[in-house]
Image: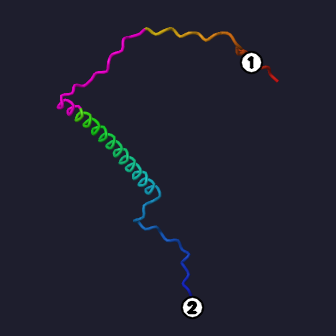
Amino acid sequence: MATAKPSRTRRQPSAKTPSKAQLRQQRKQQSLETTQKMADAAYLKTYRHTQIAIARQEAKQQALTDAGIKQQQPPVAPQQKQKPLTKAPSSGRKPQNRKPPRR
């Protein structure tokens, strides 16, 4: 039984197969589109969460208003003068402000 050997001649690429540069360009385009989709999805998710938080806050405010409860304002603290920062005591060991000797 003789087995058929594969031909040693190189096959010419068919006209349908894109070149390496075209494949690279397609992959680059796909990755850009994927990145854009992911960025859009993240933005929409953040936007929705923000809108939901605002709606919750407004609903809570409306419920309190409907119940007749007034919103409490935090008390304003009287302005106090800041005390000047006290200097650290100069007693004790002081660091040497010189270079260490060369060896």
| Disc 1: which residue | 99
* 69 relative position to 30: left or right: left
* 67 relative position to 51: left or right: left
Please provide percent x and percent y for residue 20: 47, 58
> Label 2: how many residues lie within 10 Å, few (<14), some (14-19) or many (20+)?
few
Identify the residue at image location x=54%, y=78%. Answer: 6
Residue 67 lies in the magenta stretch? yes
Residue 88 lies in the magenta stretch? no
* 39 relative position to 61: left or right: right
Depth check: 80 or 45 in front?
80
Vertical side of 94 occupied by 46: above or below: below
Identify the residue at image location x=23%, y=31%. Answer: 61
Q: On residue 75, which mark appears?
A: none
Q: Residue furthest right?
A: 103
- Per the picture, the main secondary structure of the magenta-coloured stretch is loop
| Disc 2: which residue | 1
Depth check: 61 or 103 in front?
61
Please provide percent x and percent y for residue 56: 26, 37
Q: Which residues are magenta?
A: 61-80
Please provide percent x and percent y for residue 9: 54, 74
Which quarter shows the N terminus?
bottom right
Identify the residue at image location x=34%, y=46%. Answer: 41
* 44 relative position to 80: left or right: left
Please provide percent x and percent y for residue 5: 56, 81
Regarding mark 2 in the picture, which secondary structure is present there?
loop
Check disc 1 and give the amino acid type. Lys
